[in-house]
Image (tube, grey):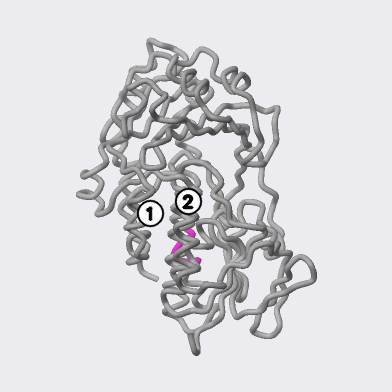
Amino acid sequence: MAGKPHILIAGAGIGGLTAALALLQRGFDVDVYEQAPQLLEFGAGIQIAANGSRLLIALGLEPQMKRIAKEAAGKEVRIWNTGQTFKLFDLGEDSVRRFGAPYWFVHRGDLNAVLRDAVLAQKSDAIHTGSRCLGYTQNGSRVVMQIEGGRSAEGDCLIAADGVHSLFRQQMFDSAKSEFMGIIAWRGLIPMKSLSEDLQRPVGTNWVGPRGHVITYPVRSGELLNFVGFGERDDWRGESWNEKGSKEECAADFKGWHPYVHEMIAKTDQPYKWALIGRDPLQTWTKGPVALLGDSCHPTLPFLAQGAIMAIEDGVVLARCLDKFDDVETALQHYQMARVERATKIVIGSTEAGKRFHNPILADSAAAVGYMEREWAPEKVRLRYDWLFEYDATAIPI
């Protein structure tokens, strides 16, 4: 580690831990500060397409990921009330053949645990829990991060991976606050064996409707089905990922939907709800020796299933830049230049996907089939997704 800058990272989520691991593997000294008192396996499912799985494999995590992930056989789209099914795309061997890496369904907590353990294997005291970061100051070329309780940490570079409500983003740019997007999400986990056989297939399914949609896919090696239901509402502003709701309230948001949707809601262990929060993506992510990463600079709606992967991509590109350029500020500028255009395109594309999933035309049974055939025609699907999956953060120019 001699001669390499000491890196401070605020936030031990997927992006912060990926950056830490990629930097530690390149010989940097890294310390990660996390406000939670311990790293719990919270959350629900996430999808890791080829552009994310190839990075986890490059980081040496393929054996661990194979133990926790369910490889997807394919993805499909279904009409909200009839259940009529349309193929989105094949996955499995097709993903490996076309994009060079698998498509995985995983539990967010399982992925966090894999990344945490890999970081600690590189440096056993790298993660400091119970450390709520409050801001930073600069001391010459050094950056000093303030931590609740009168503590501080000093390094050569600070990476703010502290999420959509980032304190560091506010300090750096005094940017506008995040906004409620008029959509709430319900999430829950369902024992797979409790469900009808049609719902147990190893596929990802998007149920699309006039004012909402539902996404399901298997996690925990296929033992559980991850359920996320999105509905348009303007009467709720909660921001916690762990606010409990009731099955009755969830079912009311999907009144008239297919019996399978209501079967899943009824068999969910405990439904939780949260508000979808968004903001315009920043075009400037760095200031001196400080840079933003993940949701702190490009929070996105989850409708392209790229939010977590974007943070993984950020972490890998950041590590490459800090490894290539001796000067920290130069490295961070190259990181920003390499990532801003793609991140902005994904944020915009995710918003457009939400409109496609919630189109009012789907309320008309006669028109719905034609709409599905047009919007999910194979050539349109390739245009919307291939550029996402082909991207390789280990090889893009920096």
Q: Quadrant of residue 370?
A: top left
Q: Is residue 330 above or below residue 37?
A: below
The number of discs equals 2
- Give the numbered dot on residue 363: none
**Is 277 left, or right, of 230 in this rendering?**
right
Chain-order first, disc 1 or disc 2: 1
Residue at horizontal 66 percent and vertical 47 percent from the top: 178
Say whether residue 168 is magenta: no
The disc placed on residue 308 is 2
Q: Which region shows up in magenta?
A: 336-340
Q: Name the residue at 69% across, 64% down.
A: 131
Q: Quadrant of residue 35?
A: bottom right
Disc 1 to disc 2, C-alpha distance: 8 Å
The spot of residue 382 in percent (x, y) is 29, 41
Vertical position of residue 176 compared to residue 19: above or below: above
Q: Residues within 10 Å of mark 2 (few under 14, many from 20)?
A: many
Q: Nearer the viewer, residue 334 or 311?
A: 311
Above-or-below relation of 29 to 342: below
Q: What kind of element bears circle 1?
A: helix
Q: Amino acid at mark 2?
A: Ala
Q: Residues within 10 Å of mark 1 (few under 14, many from 20)?
A: many
> Left of 74 or right of it: where is 139?
right
Residue placed most toward the observer, 125 or 76: 125
> Please, what is the dominant secondary structure of the magenta stretch?
helix
Q: Is residue 337 magenta?
A: yes
360 relative position to 398: left or right: right
| Residue at image mark 1 | 52
